[in-house]
Image (spheres, grey):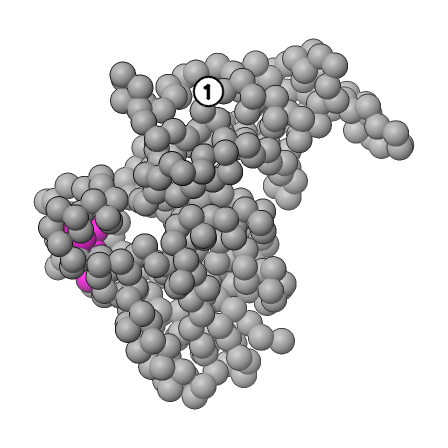
Amino acid sequence: MKKAIILSSGGVDSTTCLSVAVNALGAENVSTASIFYGQKHKKELDAARAVAAYYHVPHYEFDLAQIMQYSNCSLLSHSTESIVHKSYGEQIAEKGAGKVSTYVPFRNGLMISVAASLAAGIYEEEETDIYVGAHGDDAAGEAYADCSPRFLKAMREAVAVGTYGKVHLVFPFADKNKTGVVAEGLKLGTPYELTWSCYEGGDTRLLKTGWKTRGMEGKDNMFTVTKRMEISGAHFLRLNYESKCTSMHGHNWIVTVTVQNDKLDENGMVVDFTKIKDVVNLFDHRCANDIMEGLNPTAENMAKWLCDRIPHCIRVAVQETEGNTAVYEK
């Protein structure tokens, strides 16, 4: 059976790649690999670990920070440059075609090389695909030269030659933009609540390019904010079959709320994190049956109940246990 390694940054694109690979090959044939290259924070790596755990796949990590110590790219922890919070399109419109401020020198080339070497080692006798999440927005206007069609083609040929034809590069989103990537991920139930797509630390997850989700058609360059909370509570379910869940029992729910809007309020926010917290905390140390009167307090109903009461909310995920998560999306 063919194997696959997904270069995982913990972000939207690579996590969608993982969904595609698991759907095609089964989790038992898939691994993930993450690279620390000296970026400003390690939340991306934490997200990559969480995503790998969600799919129950082996996860490998490598450190390339020493190589990047000579670059002053704004993404690096030692850089004297500030990160530009503008879309690729806006930067290209201002400065013309060419690399954007967040280009890390030959980063994708290094990462692909690491993944190819890993594949040739752990899957020595088997055919292996390396999934790379580069998409059309990355290559637009040569924003990232190491995402361009010419680069990807050259690397595909080099990896195949250098591994005796055993390892192959796969770019499932090369002909898609961010909207297309997310649309594919939503079909596959990709756990976007676990991802991290911000170049900096903090609580705000601002996607690097505009993308659309259901209910927001026609609106690009969206501000997307995610808040993740853990609350403790109890409930009992009303079911038409025998189950221990019909008795009162407790959970440490992990609730992930995503809000989105194309403009900010007068305070520069989509929604204040406190407002999200106040709604979610209605369930903290409470019986969900008392809160959701008339509704069977399943994780699914809980997710919808919360989403309906949080301004600009487009998605709520309620995780009951490590392997059980219910998601409601508008």
Foreground residue, 145 or 214? Answer: 214
Q: Which residue sits at x=58%, y=49%?
A: 187
Q: Label 1 belongs to which residue?
A: 311
**Count of all numbered marks drawn on residues in the image:** 1
User: Which quadrant holds the N terminus?
Assistant: bottom right
Main SS, magenta residues: loop
Q: Residue 110, can we see it?
A: no
Q: Residue furthest front?
A: 218
Question: Any magenta on residue 104?
Answer: yes
Q: Which residue sits at x=13%, y=46%?
A: 94
User: Which quadrant holds the C terminus?
Assistant: top right
> Could you tell me which secondary element the residue under label 1 belongs to?
loop
Position of residue 322 relative to residue 58, above or below, is above
Q: Position of residue 279 (x, y in %)?
A: 52, 16
Q: Position of residue 149 (x, y in %)?
A: 31, 70
Looking at the rendering, which quadrant does residue 222 occupy?
Answer: top left
Residue 21 shown left or right of residue 150 in the figure:
right
Q: Position of residue 30 (x, y in %)?
A: 55, 64
> Badge 1: how crowded within 10 Å, few (<14), some, or many (20+)?
some
Foreground residue, 103 or 139? Answer: 139
Amino acid type at mark 1: Pro
Stretch in magenta? 100-105
Foreground residue, 261 or 155? Answer: 261
Q: Residue 152, can we see it?
A: yes
Position of residue 75 relative to residue 255, above or below, is below
Q: Which residue sits at x=45%, y=38%?
A: 217
